[in-house]
Image (cartoon, grey):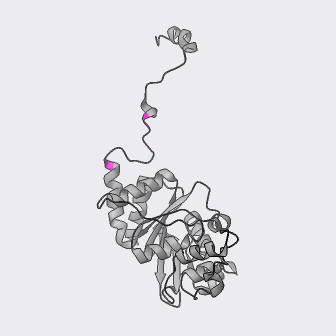
Amino acid sequence: MVENKKLNEVFNEYLRLATFPVAIKVSQEDSLPAKVKAASALFGYPINICQGISIARRFGRTIGFLEKDHACGLSILIFGYKEDPDFALAGHTIYPLYAKTPEAGARTQAATPKMEIGGIKSIVVAPLHRADFAPDLVLIYGNGAQIVRLIQAALYNEGGAIQSQFMGRCSCGVYIVKALQTQKCHVVVPGGGERVFAQTADDEIAFVIPAAQIQNVVEGLIGTHNSGVARIPTPFFGTSARPIFPSSYDELDRYCGLK
């Protein structure tokens, strides 16, 4: 779509991203669009949603997910394909990996975003510039400076602060479920599973933009850029500061006519 290509150009011009912004479409349809291949069909086995997103943003492929295409049981619960079983509610999918006690694990499980049962039937992820659909979400990975620019952009019109949720795990619950439920932008710190399976780099964080916020973020990105202070690359003051050399260079400076 022309709109997606133009949006992609804006993000690349003002953020200089290393990987493609990702368009995400969430549907209650039991089947994928005709031109979209399911993850299981592409690879011969199911994969994690974070892997699909990594493939889309790094290699430019479009991938579809039905329930059978998800390899991660945690995602199956988060996306509302199945009810949380009692052992998960009791914290035993988190303890002892991420919690000292089952009780602590249960509290983290209760805080994990979850779509209502049947709320999601299919998900399509694609590089934004190649997506032939209007995205429900745009997910952008970047470094700290790039994500700060998106935070500034999102707050440009209304002010306030970005409210986000961090658990060190199940980041798909934030950048898909939480973003859809709140219709607000979120900063996403990719969890341990995403870094292991999707090869998300140590210095990468992410930012998700619901469709309703896209134009607001674009306006803010351009507006804050035009202010001249907030830009990518960061306009470090030292780049244009007058150089000062140690006194051991004095003789050379006099020889070269610098003093």
Note whether 119 is above or below 224 in the view shown. below
Question: Residue 201 lies in magenta, yes or no?
Answer: no
Q: Quadrant of residue 92?
A: bottom right
Note whether 148 is above or below 95 in the view shown. above
For the point 39% across and 64% down, the residue is 7
In magenta, the rendered stretch is 226-237
242 relative to 160 in the view: left or right: right
90 relative to 5 in the view: left or right: right
Q: Quadrant of the N terminus?
A: bottom left
217 relative to 75 in the view: left or right: left
Note whether 75 is above or below 247 in the view shown. below
Question: Residue 236 lies in magenta, yes or no?
Answer: yes
Q: Quadrant of residue 68?
A: bottom right
The answer to whether residue 70 is seen in the rendering is no
20 relative to 158 in the view: left or right: right
In the image shown, does 8 or 100 lie closer to the viewer?
A: 100
Instruction: Give the main secondary structure of the magenta stretch.
Output: loop
x and y percentages locating residue 255 in the rendered image: 53, 8
